[in-house]
Image: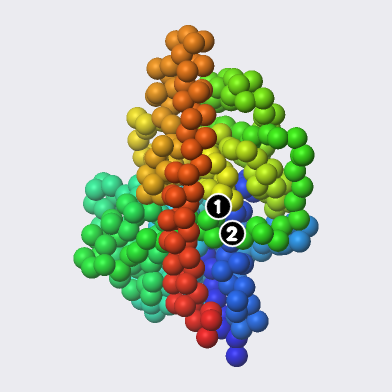
């Protein structure tokens, strides 16, 4: 009899390329035992079907946690599903626009469906992979209902592999024991080796900006780097909608690029996954206020020993007083790009972590048995 696995994921708002990368990666992890398992994807907000040329994602609408009773395992896969800030901002905003629910009703649904509140039987069947609570604050935890629900879920879950070192630490502090471990962002587990992709023959580098609020400045820098290097600059418009097929095309361009310049979290991770040199820009003085906060980029590059590839916008602005200073700053960026040895050293260490994460996920789900 096949094992039945429920996968609970965030709503793929706007067919976001980063979220699609996260969700598609699950197929690669489960592939070794695909004939021995039945997988049903759920999201809290709506039923969603996303068609691609060779793949499809079908999210069933999770409205009642009794829908999960029949499953052997429950997987929370990626994103921010257990952070109070996600529920109060992202989720509540979309749900109140989509339905007539008020804030209290939206939050009650989130507690029951995403934290499995007061359902230890469901919590004890749960696995938490690639999620994050790095934005957790004492104010969040002063909410007694939230603290108790999150602590119960994390204490009773079978395995917790979160995507960043802060989340691991916060979870273990809250639980009072070491039950959360470092995994990775699920997008890093996506296998694109068999994707049928095309790219230009002429040498180029890839850009896409839109998260830091400094797009015009970064476009100016990238144009100057294009002039210095003689490489064509291709803007892949990572944040545009387009679905699975568009993601394939974007990944194809990234794979053959000389390097990537961006201020976008999942575009950066995609470049790293494909072993393409990347420079990511972010605001060093930002605060953790929502799921798009800049700190998640900084944390990823820091914990991956790639800090030299993360450039603070604050430093760019200091160099923007004259054309000469902008030129000097651009050359500093090119110096980082040219040091492939350091980049590959960090990637080799990251590969060790990714391989360990894959083994832990698969063995915990008895995929190889």
Q: Is residue 168 above or below residue 281?
A: below
Asked if the residue at tag 1 contacts the one at tag 2, i.e. Cβ–Cβ closer than 8 Å, the answer is yes
Residue nearer the viewer, 47 or 258:
258
What's the colour scheme?
rainbow
Give how far across and how far down residue 347 sits, in percent: 48, 52
Q: Residue at x 32, y 58 (%)?
A: 168
Q: Earlier in the sequence, mark 2 or mark 1?
A: 2
| Numbered disc 2: secondary structure | loop
Give the image quarter of residue 233.
top right
Give the image quarter of residue 5.
bottom right
Residue highlighted by disc 1: 273
Residue 228 makes an appearance in the image: yes
Q: Residue at x 41, y 68 (%)?
A: 116
Q: Is residue 317 above or below residue 337?
A: above
Residue 119 makes an appearance in the image: no
Residue highlighted by disc 2: 190
Q: Which label number is shown at residue 201? A: none
Give how far across and how far down residue 121 sits, in percent: 39, 79
Give how far across and how far down residue 299 sits, in percent: 38, 45
């Amino acid at each position: 009899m096949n094992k039945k696995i429920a996968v609970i994921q965030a709503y793929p708002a706007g067919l976001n390329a980063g979220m699609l990368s996260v969700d598609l990666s699950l197929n690669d992890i489960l592939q070794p035992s695909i004939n021995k398992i039945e997988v049903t994807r759920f999201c809290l907000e709506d039923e969603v079907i996303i068609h691609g040329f060779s793949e499809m994602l079908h999210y069933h609408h999770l409205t009642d946690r009794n829908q999960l009773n029949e499953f052997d395992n429950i997987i929370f896969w990626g994103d921010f599903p257990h952070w109070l800030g996600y529920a109060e901002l992202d989720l509540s905003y979309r749900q109140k626009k989509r339905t007539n629910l008020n804030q209290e009703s939206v939050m009650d649904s989130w507690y029951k469906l995403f934290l499995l509140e007061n359902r230890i039987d469901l919590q004890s069947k749960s696995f938490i992979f690639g999620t994050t609570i790095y934005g957790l604050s004492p104010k969040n935890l002063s909410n007694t209902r939230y603290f108790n629900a999150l602590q119960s879920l994390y204490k009773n879950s079978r395995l917790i592999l979160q995507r960043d070192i802060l989340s691991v630490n916060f979870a273990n502090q809250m639980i009072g024991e070491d039950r959360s471990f470092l995994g990775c962002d699920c997008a890093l587990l996506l296998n694109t080796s068999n994707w049928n992709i095309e790219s230009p023959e002429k040498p180029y580098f890839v850009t896409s900006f839109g998260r830091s609020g400094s797009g015009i400045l970064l476009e100016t820098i990238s144009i100057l780097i294009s002039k210095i290097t003689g490489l064509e600059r291709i803007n892949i418009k990572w944040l545009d909608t387009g679905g699975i097929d568009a993601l394939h095309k974007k990944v194809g361009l990234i794979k053959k690029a000389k390097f990537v310049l961006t201020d976008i979290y999942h575009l950066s991770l995609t470049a790293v996954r494909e072993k393409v040199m990347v420079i990511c820009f972010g605001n060093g003085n930002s605060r953790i206020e929502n799921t798009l906060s800049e700190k998640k980029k900084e944390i990823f590059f820091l914990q991956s020993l790639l800090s030299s590839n993360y450039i603070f916008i604050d430093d760019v602005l200091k160099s923007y007083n004259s054309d000469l200073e902008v030129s000097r700053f651009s050359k500093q960026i090119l110096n980082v790009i040219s040091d492939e040895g350091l980049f590959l050293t960090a990637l080799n260490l990251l590969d060790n972590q990714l391989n360990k994460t894959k083994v832990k996920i698969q063995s915990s789900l008895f995929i190889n048995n």
